[in-house]
């Protein structure tokens, strides 16, 4: 493997681990801790909320440090820091200690998106395909969280679900650090600068159109985060409740039994969640192709319609029907991810693009954190059927925003070299 391919592979592994670490607790809380510690699922979610706030809020200082010091250096901090934080969380003996561990994990997890994606978009010319591939790795991290955590719960305990990935991340950090020493010139590469003469302020109608589209982008970013968090975090618990009949059939057919003679329910739930996440993650590649061919308006309308229809269908469903519909709304949830990034990339000039992306991550991840209390409150009072109806309403908001989106986006007023 060439050094360039290894570099890109490690960045992709970083995106995979970033989302994996942020969702380990989702499966641990749903399938282990609420039984072992006798604490309600809704009560456990409160301890994950600060970590998701850190995931969003610390992305700005992480990006600032990367620009002032070193992007590759910050990636080394990411791998080692998030790995050690996860290992420490695995030794927690109380909900408070787990909450602290998840908060520190969130701080280090905040590094990846502003830093890792900046490296991906600046180091290689074929940025479109690189971003698409990198995004799929992140989605597979979401998918693998339920699978790996469920398996480790059944075959070693929930603590191992934090410790083993943590050790692996530290090892990747060491490899990345060694590679960085061989590529030290990349640390000091100056970013492209766009002079004031190259950036046109545009006419008043153009500025109004930019403001209109920007409002739509950040609105859909916020509501998409509610959908993404509600589905990725809660899906293991949804499957644990809704697929009992299907799980019994699968366990009898596949003889999925642990050494104690008990059915490995956590493994089955994790496997089904992984399959749904993995298949749905491929929607990102399809959406990327459609964006290039048709533009964001019809694609966003299609995604909003998918979310509205499938979330509205989900209340009351169980077993195979629930599994099929869950795959449908996950296609809509994952399919929306590249649309907002595409619109920002088309509109923002090279001089301001990184800062606008940073604000986008703060908005997205802050809403991710706020979604956890929403999930807990709705589940504790009314159950998941009400959550599905709320998410159907979110899909309607996305569809409505797409309808008022202009057919052609205002383009960035920058030189071709700066635009992507």
Image (cartoon, rainbow, N blue to C red):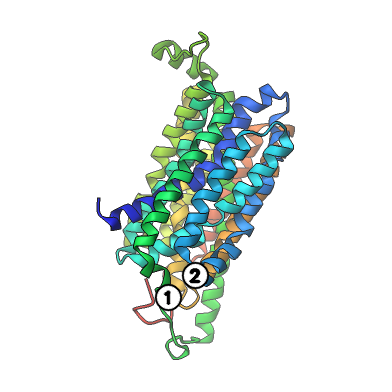
State which quarter of the image contains the C terminus.
bottom left
In contact (CB < 8 Å): disc 2 and disc 1: yes
When the figure is inspected, residue 353 is found, relative to residue 378, above or below; the finding is: below
| Res. 358 image quadrant | bottom right
The percent coordinates of residue 371 (x first, y second) are 65, 47
The percent coordinates of residue 339 (x first, y second) are 45, 58
The percent coordinates of residue 393 (x first, y second) are 61, 47
Question: Mark number for residue 354?
Answer: 2
Q: Nearer the viewer, residue 115 or 307?
A: 115
User: Which residue occupies 61% across, 39% down?
Assistant: 88
The residue that label 1 is drawn on is 191
User: Which residue occupies 49% across, 65% down?
Assistant: 405
* First-in-chain label (2 vs 1): 1
Secondary structure under tag 2 reads helix
Q: Give the crowd class for mark 2: few <14, some 14-19, many >=20 residues within 10 Å.
A: some
369 displayed left or right of 157: right
């Amino acid at each position: 493997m060439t050094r360039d391919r290894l570099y890109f592979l490690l960045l992709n592994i970083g995106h995979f681990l970033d989302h994996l670490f942020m969702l380990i607790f989702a499966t641990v809380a749903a399938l282990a801790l609420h039984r072992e510690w006798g604490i309600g699922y809704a009560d456990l979610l409160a301890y994950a909320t600060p970590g998701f706030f850190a995931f969003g809020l610390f992305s700005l200082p992480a990006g600032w440090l990367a620009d002032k010091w070193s992007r590759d250096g910050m990636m080394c901090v990411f791998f080692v820091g998030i790995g050690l934080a996860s290992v420490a969380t695995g030794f927690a003996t109380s909900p408070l200690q787990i909450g602290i561990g998840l908060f520190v994990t969130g701080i280090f997890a905040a590094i990846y998106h502003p830093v890792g994606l900046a490296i991906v978009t600046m180091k290689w010319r074929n940025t479109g395909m690189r971003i698409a591939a990198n995004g799929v790795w992140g989605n597979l991290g979401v998918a693998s969280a339920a699978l790996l955590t469920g398996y480790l719960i059944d075959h070693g305990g929930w603590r191992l679900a934090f410790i083993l990935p943590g050790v692996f991340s530290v090892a990747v950090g060491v490899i990345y650090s060694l590679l960085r020493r061989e590529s030290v010139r990349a640390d000091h590469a100056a970013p492209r600068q766009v002079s004031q003469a190259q950036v046109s302020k545009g006419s008043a109608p153009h500025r109004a159109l930019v403001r209109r589209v920007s409002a739509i982008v950040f609105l859909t970013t916020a509501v998409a985060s509610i959908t993404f968090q509600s589905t990725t975090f809660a899906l293991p618990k949804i499957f644990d409740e809704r697929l009992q009949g299907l799980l019994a059939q699968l366990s009898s057919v596949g003889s999925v039994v642990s050494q104690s003679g008990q059915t490995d329910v956590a493994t089955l739930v994790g496997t089904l969640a992984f399959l749904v996440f993995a298949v749905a993650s491929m929607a990102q590649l399809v959406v990327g192709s459609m964006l290039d061919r048709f533009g964001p308006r019809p694609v966003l309308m299609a995604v909003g319609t998918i979310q509205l229809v499938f979330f509205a269908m989900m209340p009351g469903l169980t077993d195979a029907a629930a599994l099929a519909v869950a795959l449908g709304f996950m296609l809509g949830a994952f399919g929306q991810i590249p649309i907002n990034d595409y619109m920002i990339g088309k509109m923002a000039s090279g001089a301001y693009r990184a800062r606008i992306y940073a604000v986008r991550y703060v908005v997205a991840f802050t809403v991710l954190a706020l979604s956890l209390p929403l999930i807990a409150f709705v589940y504790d009072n009314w159950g998941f059927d009400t959550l599905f109806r709320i998410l159907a309403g979110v899909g309607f908001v996305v569809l409505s925003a797409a309808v008022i989106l202009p057919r052609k986006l205002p383009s960035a007023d920058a030189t071709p070299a700066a635009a992507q």
